[in-house]
Image (cartoon, rainbow, N blue to C red):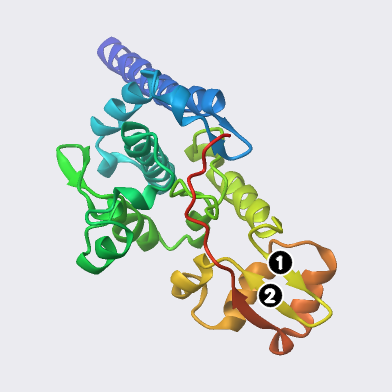
Amino acid sequence: MQKGTVVLLSIMLILFMFTDQLSAQDQQLFTDVLQKYVKNGLVDYKGLTQDKNLDKYLSQLSQTNPDKLNRDEKLAFWINAYNAFTLQVVRDNYPIESITELHTGGKVIGYLLGKTVWDKEFITINNKKYSLNDIEHKILRKMGEPRIHFAVVCASISCPELRNEAFEADKIDAQLYEQTTKFLNDKTRNHFDIKNRKAYISEIFNWFGEDFGKSDENILKFISKFISGNISKDIQSNISSWSISFNDYDWGLNNTK
């Protein structure tokens, strides 16, 4: 091998290692923020108002070109982006009792006019403007991974619990599995009456039913993969006997008390 080729390969290896290290540092910055201000899925927004590390992380997100990432990297990137920018918009408007207070015209009018907090294009990534809805519906949902619904958190009590670590490409599958399992086995969000074969489940399955296979039967099949023992077995063996009811959604802020 020629000397010039060896030098070139060495430089490429160093750059590759540096890029990996930089990526790890970026995710660690968000993990540090989450571990400091998130406990049992609840956020210390008051404390977060005094912290600058979230802004540093948001700046790093904004300067990233996600088109250069592979699938798992994109999945982790956009989930982290959704959660981080949601933290930002709540923090910047704190104190509030619900994220729905940030809709233009209030909770009802905002929905009717399509001017909710999730419709606002306040996010800039790689010189492009995005809303939270853009990230969730136009990017993440199109990736064909229904478990994202238990990873993105809209700052409300009935949402999945906010994870106190950043999502990372090399362990994204395990993280999504853990998030989904935890959410579905949380009796405050989903409850299963095996005696009457009635599933009382989150509105998430109503809003995004098509992501789980559209029909009640397909939703139950999905759920049965993540819930514990006897209930899972009964759903799989007697799926046509089970019925679904959707729980009321609590839009109260996921704030520490």
Residue 185 image position (x, y, % from top left): 71, 57
- The amino acid sitting under disc 2 is Ala
Identify whether 90 is placed above or below 100: above
Q: Can the viewer see residue 8 in this picture?
A: yes
Seen from the viewer's position, the closer of residues 236 and 20 is 236
Identify whether 229 is placed above or below 175: below
Label 1 sits on a secondary structure element that is strand
Identify whether 167 is placed above or below 233: above
Identify whether 8 is placed above or below 59: above
- The amino acid sitting under disc 1 is His
The image quarter containing residue 191 is bottom right
Q: Is residue 202 left or right of residue 191?
A: left
Q: Mark 1, residues whose alpha carbon is within 10 Å: few (<14), some, or many (≥20)?
A: some
Position of the C terminus by quadrant: top right
Q: Identify the residue shown where x is 38% and y is 25%.
A: 54
Residue 126 image position (x, y, % from top left): 19, 37
Q: Is residue 29 left or right of residue 5?
A: right
Seen from the viewer's position, the closer of residues 229 and 44 is 44
Instruction: Check disc 1 and report the residue beneath it.
Output: 191
Instruction: Check disc 2 and report the residue beneath it.
Output: 199
